[in-house]
């Protein structure tokens, strides 16, 4: 198959997605009270269609959380003096492909710094004085793990999700950050009930089949480290020099190789700023954007690609449920493998 | 992409199907009374997994049907003297690719002959005297359309299907035939609740993604006609001569071109008798076989490929429900288009 035939097949795939799968303009808002678990499953989960659920956070428990958690001081008192894990980056992109030059691209993760919740709020609010963008995005069950007293305040699940998926959440996470912090395009192997407690969350979404246009490749793994915490730790001198040369305003940050992680597969395409010349198939993408308001819940189907940020200081809680690895996963893998075969065939021809 | 890469991708697709989708050895039997509509939807419909449902035909209505319909004379009296449509073929393959030689392949449909149900049972039972294989397989709502008094005896739907799919059946069909009649590998755009009333039905099943291995191609359309009904109708002399030369025992049958139908896309691979040399990717197929007994219901998901026959004189009723054209359909189309592109690229290279 030549590159033109593949581009034509990807264009047809994208047309089918527009006709049969991805809502074209916007994510629907649906009143949870009108949805039986079967209707939710049939219309959204089985079809792998995201939807914003309203009125899913109206129990007494949620009402307390939605009111009390507006106050940082209340949260600080509940959390106590234990240390928590905060992700810190020079300019807000945690877990992202860092392009230094065409030959020098890395997958860079944030520095993970331990501090109290009080200290986190202090640096989050000190935009001028603190060097870096802090984001409480530790995930992997962070709410249960690091904030047991706050976890005790939220319901153990969104009932509609539990009944429809037929299982309890595998992980419950808390997310606190502002408009500077961005999670770049990625997917999770979880059904996601994402609840905004305070503020406004902005999502950019792509269906799993868009893996055909996203040029996922393997990058050497690295981490940001700030000079104030680096101490004697070894950093990558050449890469750090290249980084300083590309980002002269961030010379207090260093790049530390992450050899235990090895190579990481990640997506270099930012659907909000596409380099069409370099990634021509990304021209087919039709990114879907939505804002989830406080009190709303985004059902984000497993395997959907998402880029997420906040529009203001925002607190969210999300429930991750095991996904079903079924025929959709089989099909996804096939689209992914064809894309990889074509990408590597193409690169070989160029080199 | 070269042929070897494509073969490797198809092999990996098939491994994923075995790991995550298609049961490897046999179709499960599940007691309908243990399945809520949500559980049925989540475990079978959404995952597109066939299952044999037991105890779905136990209402009083079904018990009457399952008893009374064992008797051909009872059915004849209910059906009355109206004419019905019977499919007749020389050796049992209706709707099939007929391979006369490498350059001469057709899609051939059965002769459709009008007769009473009494006449149908007479010819069905007269194996020596009647020239051809009769099969009552008119579909397209045949039970409602041609047998209103028999339709009135069966329930209007299988309740579990109606509740899970969320719609009433679009068509209800009756099927009567014996082990000589075969429906060759094809798919339907319907969710199918297939109920065996009498006898035993044998299915060979392949998941939709096997379109990657099935070499679907376009064939000129034609119909069988028996000399006794042909009269002055024009037949295709060259094709009929080729047919008589390949099938010297069937010289009473003629091939009539079906120009209104034009070209028909069909599958030349018979998964029970694979020509690996001609269709090498079909080597990956792992056909699943099952026998549905009287009183059982096969849930056959939309788009699954199926070859069907009977093991003895068998009567079935099936309910077709609208399918959802969703992400699975989008993915299916992609696998199909890649297969077509590779097949035509390969044929071009050979010619």
Image (tube, coloured by chain):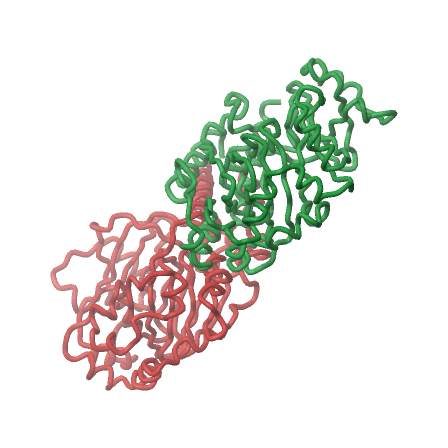
Chain colours: A red, B green
Image-based side of B115 in relation to B105, left or right: right
Task: In the rendered view, tell whether residue B247 sits above or below residue B226.
Answer: above
Q: How many marks?
A: 0
A111 vs B295, left or right, is left
Is residue A251 visible in this depiction of the protein? no
Q: Is residue B262 visible?
A: yes
Please state which of residues A150 and B54 is positioned toward the viewer in this rendering. Answer: B54
| Placement of A124 over or under A165, stated as above or below | below
Indicate the quadrant where residue A67 lies. bottom left
Screen quadrant of the C terminus of chain A: top left
Indicate the position of residue B165 as horizontal and vertical percent values: 54, 57
| Residue found at x 66% / y 41% | B74
Left or right: A210 as drawn, with respect to B140? left
In the rendered structure, the answer to whether residue B46 lies left or right of residue B244 reads: left
Instruction: Give the residue at x 32% y 72%.
Output: A317
Q: Which quadrant of the figure has residue B253?
A: top right
**Residue B52 horizontal/vertical position (percent):** 46, 44
Q: Between residues B131 and A95, which one lies in front from this camera angle?
A: B131
**What residue appears at the point 72 percent right and 45 percent down from the top-left corner?**
B146
Residue reaching furthest to the right: B232
Viewer-proximal residue, A190 or B349? A190
Q: Position of residue A12 (x, y in %)?
A: 58, 48
Q: Please report the residue visible at 27 percent of the width from the left and 81 percent of the height from the top.
A: A126
Q: In front: B65, or B250?
A: B65
Name the spot of residue A307 as percent of width and height, x first: 41, 64
């Amino acid at each position: 198959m030549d590159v033109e035939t593949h581009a034509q097949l990807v264009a047809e795939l994208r047309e089918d997605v527009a006709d049969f799968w991805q809502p074209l303009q916007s994510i629907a808002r649906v009143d949870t009270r009108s949805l039986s678990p079967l209707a939710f499953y049939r219309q959204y989960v089985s079809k792998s269609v995201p939807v914003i659920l309203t009125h899913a956070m109206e129990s007494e428990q949620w009402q307390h959380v939605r009111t009390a958690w507006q106050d940082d001081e209340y949260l600080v008192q509940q959390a106590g003096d234990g240390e928590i894990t905060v992700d810190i980056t020079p300019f807000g992109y945690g877990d992202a492909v860092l392009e230094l030059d065409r030959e020098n691209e890395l997958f860079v993760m944030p520095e993970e710094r331990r501090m109290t919740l009080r200290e986190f709020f202090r640096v989050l609010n000190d935009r001028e004085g603190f060097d870096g963008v802090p984001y409480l995005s530790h995930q992997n069950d962070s709410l249960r793990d690091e904030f047991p007293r706050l976890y005790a305040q939220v319901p153990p699940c969104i009932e509609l999700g539990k009944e429809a998926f037929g299982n309890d959440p595998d992980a419950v996470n808390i997310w606190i950050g502002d408009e500077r912090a961005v999670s770049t395009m990625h997917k999770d192997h979880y059904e996601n009930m994402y609840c905004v407690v305070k503020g406004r969350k902005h999502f950019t979404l792509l269906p799993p089949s868009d893996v055909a246009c996203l040029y996922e490749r393997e990058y050497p793994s690295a981490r940001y480290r700030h000079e104030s915490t680096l101490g004697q730790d070894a950093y990558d001198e050449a890469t750090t020099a290249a980084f300083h040369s590309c980002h002269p305003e961030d010379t207090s940050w260093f790049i530390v190789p992450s050899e235990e992680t090895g190579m990481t597969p990640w997506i270099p395409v930012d659907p909000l700023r596409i380099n069409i010349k370099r990634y021509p198939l990304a021209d087919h993408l039709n990114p879907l954007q939505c804002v989830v308001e406080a009190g709303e819940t985004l059902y984000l189907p497993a395997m959907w690609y998402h880029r997420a940020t906040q529009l203001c200081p925002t607190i969210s809680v999300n429930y991750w449920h095991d996904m079903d690895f079924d025929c959709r996963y089989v099909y996804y893998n096939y689209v992914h493998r064809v894309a990889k075969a074509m990408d590597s065939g193409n690169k070989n021809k160029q080199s």
